Image (cartoon, rainbow, N blue to C red):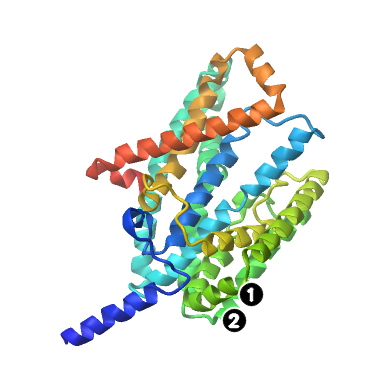
């Protein structure tokens, strides 16, 4: 029996040390999730991109048809891979998790890790947002007749329209993919789920349903499935990545990025409500190629002092609240100073970078402090 157990452990270790899921060693090992270096890398880079996307333009946008305005569009597009990147690595870990536990147990564990802290911080953000509204000039006068409307508006914004939309969308996608896992052939499941994602990409033009990606309930299921499919075929994927040069893979990503920029301008010309929609077909391709570039990297991209596995979700939850607090206090900045900053496009971008770094590091610091108290760790999930 002991020999069998040793053999099983050796077999698991052999599978876990396959080329694609490279393991971290040394002090950086604590940043890994389930031993996969690229999971930590994607998590780190994707969260940096998401925070940057929400902070880089906090002072507004440069005047249309200026060099800086075009630069802003390019920068915004460069950061539009984060959401799909998170679905991909979540799917990969789902594929691994299904080898160790049942689907219901896995679902409950994931929901517990993300849903409870999401509700808590969502309520915190809701209270802050409503308080900010009440502090505005003239708000108390309208409060008597519209308190219910104000509460409903902010509740809908915080939980369904803001960045927090990701959690309920993820839970729904996870439930569907787990329900289908092992019950429907991949040859059927993949094309069907891809059709949903492509539909939302086309819908950005047709407006058959709400065109914003935050309303795309089934738009990201394919990438959760694709991640689990990559786990099942990680050796073949690893061989393909090894054969594919950095230059070729980067050129694929660059072509997809240029197509995504073109698609942005087309949608903007059509007065789309969401021209930077994450589910633009070109951006879906761009996101996948960026994720593959990160997977191909065999070195840790994350500083050793960041615990990517346990701190990333805390950054996700906290950074929009910090942005909300800034917006509440923006009224204290002299209007003339704001006007001068906004008149200089490059200065706005530079200040946006500084603001993003401050928000990221502050969110990280708060998360670290919370995790130091065992009874409070649930607040930032994992």
SS of the residue under disc 2: helix
Return the x and y of residue 132 as percentages of the image width and height.
Answer: 50, 24
| Secondary-structure class at tag 1 | helix
Say which residue label 2 marks.
187
Q: Nearer the viewer, residue 338 or 23?
A: 23
* Residue 10 placement (x, y as % from top left): 29, 79
Front residue (pair 343, 218): 343
- Asked if residue 64 lies left or right of residue 223, the reply is right
Position of residue 248 in the picture relative to residue 92 (left or right): right
- Per the model, the C-alpha gap separating discs 1 and 2 is 7 Å
Q: Which residue is mark 1?
A: 191
In the rendered image, the quadrant that contains the N terminus is bottom left
Residue 382 shows in the view: no
Q: Is residue 293 above or below residue 1?
A: above
Rendered location of residue 163, percent (x, y): 54, 44
Give the residue drawn at x 81%, y 49%. Answer: 266
Q: Quadrant of residue 56?
A: top right
Do the CB atoms of the residues marked 1 and 2 lie less than 8 Å apart?
yes
> In the picture shown, does residue 18 fall above or below 114?
below
Seen from the viewer's position, the closer of residues 22 and 81 is: 22
Q: Residue at x 45, y 70 (%)?
A: 178
Q: Is residue 237 visible?
A: yes
Q: Would you say 366 lies left or right of 78 here?
A: left
């Amino acid at each position: 029996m002991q020999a069998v157990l040793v053999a099983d452990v050796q077999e698991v270790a052999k599978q876990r040390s396959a080329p694609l899921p490279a393991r971290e060693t040394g002090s950086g090992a604590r940043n890994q999730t389930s031993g996969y270096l690229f999971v930590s890398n994607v998590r780190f880079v994707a969260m940096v991109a998401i925070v940057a996307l929400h902070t880089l333009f906090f002072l507004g946008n440069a005047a249309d048809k200026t060099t800086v305005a075009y630069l802003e569009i390019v920068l915004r597009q460069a950061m539009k891979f984060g959401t799909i990147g998170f679905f991909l690595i979540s799917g990969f870990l789902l594929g691994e998790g299904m080898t160790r536990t049942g689907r219901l147990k896995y679902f409950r564990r994931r929901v517990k890790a993300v849903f409870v802290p999401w509700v808590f911080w969502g309520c915190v953000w809701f209270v802050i947002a409503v308080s900010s509204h009440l502090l505005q000039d003239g708000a108390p006068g309208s409060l008597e007749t519209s308190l219910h409307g104000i509460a409903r508006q902010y509740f809908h914004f915080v939980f369904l329209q803001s960045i927090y939309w990701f959690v309920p969308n993820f839970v729904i996608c996870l439930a569907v993919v787990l329900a289908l896992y092992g019950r429907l052939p991949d040859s059927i499941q993949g094309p069907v789920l891809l059709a949903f994602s492509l539909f939302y990409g086309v819908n950005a033009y047709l407006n058959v349903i709400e065109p914003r990606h935050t309303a795309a309930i089934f738009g990201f299921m394919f990438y959760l499935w694709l991640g689990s499919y990559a786990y099942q075929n990680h050796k073949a994927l690893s061989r393909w990545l090894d054969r594919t040069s950095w230059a070729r893979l980067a050129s694929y990503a660059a072509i997809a990025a240029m197509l995504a920029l073109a698609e942005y301008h087309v949608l903007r010309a059509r007065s789309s409500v969401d021209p930077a929609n994450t589910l633009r077909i070109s951006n879906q391709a761009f996101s996948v190629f960026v994720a593959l570039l990160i997977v191909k990297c065999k070195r840790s991209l994350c500083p050793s002092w960041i615990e990517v596995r346990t701190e990333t979700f805390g950054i996700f939850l906290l950074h929009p609240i910090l942005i909300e607090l800034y917006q509440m206090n923006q009224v204290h900045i002299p209007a003339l100073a704001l006007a001068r900053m906004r008149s200089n496009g490059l200065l706005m971008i530079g200040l946006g970078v500084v603001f993003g770094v401050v928000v990221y590091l502050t969110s990280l610091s708060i998360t670290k402090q919370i995790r130091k108290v065992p009874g409070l760790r649930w607040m930032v999930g994992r």
